[in-house]
Image (cartoon, rainbow, N blue to C red):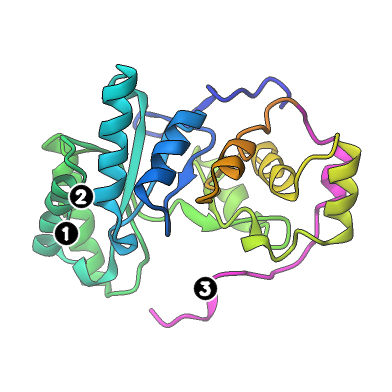
Amino acid sequence: MSSLTLQSKLKLTSGTAIPRIGFGAYLANEEAVYNALNAGYRMIDTAEFYRNEVECGSALARWLSETGSNREDVFYVTKLWNSDHGYKATAEAIDESLRRANLDYIDLYLIHSPLSSRKLRLETWKAMQDAVKAGKINQSAYLIMVEVHPWLPRKDIVSFCHEHDIVVEAYSPLTRGKRFKEPVIQELCEKYGHKSPAQILIRWSLQQGLVPIPKSNNPERIKANLDVFGFSISDEDMAKLDMKSYAPVTWDPTTSDL
């Protein structure tokens, strides 16, 4: 794991390569997304539901123009909201996401949640596959993004995905800050050279083979959250972070009605 770098990527089943860490754009403004790109993030994770696809697209266009970089250098992810399930609605939503972000294509398009019906979900999947064929999106996926952190390791899902070469994106990898003061986190922060709790949790995600999606609007934290490639957590300390618990900090899909 010590060989991981900011340039490290994982291959999706389509052959597309996804960065090992992404910037979570939930509640992010244009400046935050721009700062993230300047800091070195090469994946932007937004969604129709976040209502900031325009801002994400503007930040990307600004950064590309100022740096002379290529569109292919940034992995852009967005998601379909529940109310747009169904073939026609999904096809229109994809076009709207492209229009709002002023992009020719989306790198990865996700179904945000399965909260509709089997019929609509199947229609949605068909529309996404047709969009792939049309070149509007490079890769579509059903659910590869789940809340994962030491207090919600989801070993069942993660193990299944790894066995089947499915990449797992971890949202809320920082537990929304709710676990930062846990004694074990504080201990490891001190041990590994005064790292922040966020850096310890992000490094844990990377060593679990996940793609963490931390978020922040604070420029310094945005930079600090990328400073996780110069150290590795020992096996002994990774074991200390094996909490054997089930404690979501966001919605719990196991208690939601489908």
**Residue 94 placement, left or right of 232:** left
Instruction: Specify the segment rendered in magenta.
Output: 231-258
Q: Is residue 244 magenta?
A: yes
| Placement of 114 over or under 233, stated as above or below | below
Residue 250 is at least partly visible in this image: yes
Q: Quadrant of residue 8?
A: top right
Q: Residue at x 79, y 40 (%)?
A: 195
In-front residue for pair 155/85: 85
Which residue shows up at 14% across the image and 37% down it?
133
User: How far is mark 3 from mark 2, CA to CA?
Assistant: 25 Å
Q: Residues within 10 Å of mark 2 (few under 14, many from 20)?
A: many
Q: Pick whichever of labels 3 and 1 is earlier in the sequence.
A: 1
Q: Which residue is mark 2?
A: 128
Question: Main SS of the magenta segment?
Answer: loop
**In this rendering, would 45 be left or right of 82?**
right
Q: Secondary structure at mark 2?
A: helix
Residue type marked 2? Met
Q: Nearer the viewer, residue 205 or 64?
A: 64
From the image, tell me which residue sits under label 1. Answer: 90
Amino acid carrying label 3: it is Trp
Taking the image as shown, residue 128 lies to the left or right of residue 146, namely: left
What is the CA distance from the residue labelled 3 to the residue labelled 1? 24 Å
* Residue 27 x, y percent position in the rendering: 42, 59
Q: What residue sits 11% from the left and 37% below the top?
A: 134
| Picture residue at 14% right of the left edge, 53% below the top | 96
Q: Position of residue 68 (x, y in %)?
A: 30, 16
Residue 212 lies, in percent from the top left, at: 56, 45
- Mark nearer the N terminus (3 vs 2): 2
**Which comes before the other along the chain, label 2 or label 1?**
1
Label 2 with label 1: CB-CB less than 8 Å: yes
